Amino acid sequence: MTTQSDDKPSRRPIRGGVGRRTFLKQSVSLAAIAGLAPAFDIFMPHVARAAIKPEKEELKFGFIKLTDMAPIAIAKENGYFEDEGLFVSVEAQANWKVLLDRVITGELDGAHMLAGQPLGATIGVGTKAHVITPFSMDLNGNGITVSNAIWEQMKPFVPTGADGKPVHPIKADALKKVVEKFKADGKPFNMGMVFPVSTHNYYLRYWLAAAGINPGFYSPSDITGQIMADVLLSVTPPPQMPATLEAGTILGYCVGEPWNQQAVFKGIGVPVITDYEIWKNNPEKVFGFSADFQKKNPNTVLAATKALIRAGMWLDENNNANRLKAVSILAKPEYVGADAKVIANSMTGTFEYEKGDKRSVPDFNVFFRYFATYPYYSDATWFLTQMRRWGQIAEAKTDSWYADVAKDVYRPDIYLAAAKLLVAEGKAKKSDFPWDTDGYKAPNKDFIDDVAYDGKKPNEYLKNLGIGLKGDQKISGTKVVAN
């Protein structure tokens, strides 16, 4: 915890009060906020705002040392949590499993989470517990890195431009030739991802499968995810990725920043593709609470969501003008704790692939624009389709099942209640939020394999993918069979 100088007033909320600032009006619940609109126009600037009195003021939030935890750090450092009457301490966690378990047990009040974690927990993939998210933390932010040796073997199969540099995006077709040689020589091809229900697992699998490389299946009796696999994927915590690659335990990995750029900085690996190139403006992390915590503390969750939205706005405002300041904050040991130069590579709109090949990627990290913070049902559904595709969801499900799970976990009602208050307080513009959406993005083909995705038709989408379970297929032993 940071200490405060004697000549500055404490920003710690007053116990029994609503925070550092003098809030006007009475305490209201989430349900009451949602019902304000019929009574008066909540968007009119002259309307006095309703104060939110959090049920729980002192909170502990968890995170993993990745740059996309930035909204939490900024909400804390800029005083946005305290503006909402929240005294928040933050704590780095050893890995994603520990983080999820601690949210479920109540040791953490909320946390930076993989988008698949609230969904997986709620339907019982691994841990079983109802977890919700009212806030999507960012878009994009991941990359796939291979060792220098593997890159040298891939390069002959990668097209080059007039400048002699590789043409991006680099498809896994180039890696397929290398994998086939390993297989012919009887050698395993090992790659790392951060957690079985992580975006990294699904984006890595998507990239591999688009080139005809089987990344393996899960089954109720075999949760390794390596059934029938051409490439063996295993879990490695994000900060350990570069060292594990350098040791030769894995030959490549998918991870968030700064751990791809760290491989370049250390000269041990080459990022070959970003997740933006696999799925343009893909959803990445979310902020999760246990459903039980939200039921007991609806105002607290609403207040935290307001603070996180403001942090996302700050990170993207004025064409990313605040990013260098954000980098200096994230470099602190209590947050990401990596070299500021490494963090800045991606956070300031550039990305370095092969050493010296630095390119402009302005949307590598997106924290607010494109409605990044809205928790879309279609995003939730996509992650569920990948769980089904690779056998984590063992049996066929109806389209309505996907929709019901998405709505049980993703909570845009909380998000929009927070947004309404921010607009009423003059801290956000009405145009900043997608008020009229039904929670589903328009069907699109923004994927590296050009397969169209419609969040309202998950089974049709699965049917159009190459490798993977579809229809009533399931894994039996080491084979894909139909019921």
Image (cartoon, helix red, strand yellow):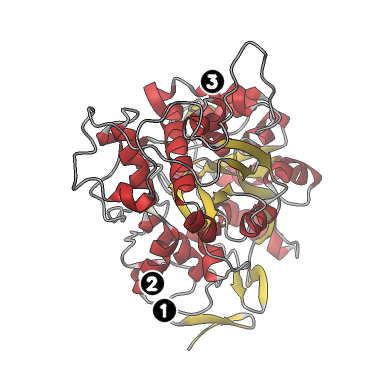
| Residue at the limit of the structure toward the top, as seen here | 7
Q: Which mark is residue 27?
A: none
Residue in view at x 56 percent, y 31 percent: 14
Which of pointers 2 and 1 lies earlier in the amino acid sequence?
2
Which residue is at the front of the view, 59 or 115? 59
* Left or right of 192, for residue 444: left
At label 3, which amino acid type do we have?
Answer: Leu
Instruction: Write down the quadrant of residue 61 in the picture.
Output: top right
At label 2, which amino acid type do we have?
Answer: Lys
At label 1, which amino acid type do we have?
Answer: Gly
Q: Which mark is residue 471?
A: 1
Q: SS class of the residue under badge 2?
A: helix
Classify mark 1: residues with Cα within 10 Å, few (<14), some (14-19) or many (20+): some
- Mark-to-mark CA distance, 3 and 1: 48 Å
Which residue is at the front of the view, 380 or 40? 40
Residue 193 visible in the displayed image: no
Circle 2 is placed at which residue position?
Answer: 463
Q: SS class of the residue under badge 1?
A: loop
Position above or below: 2 against 210: above
Percent position (x, y) of residue 276?
45, 43
Q: Are marks 3 and 1 in contact (CB under 8 Å)?
A: no
Percent position (x, y) of residue 382?
42, 60
Circle 3 is placed at which residue position?
Answer: 324
Residue in view at x 45 percent, y 51 percent: 298
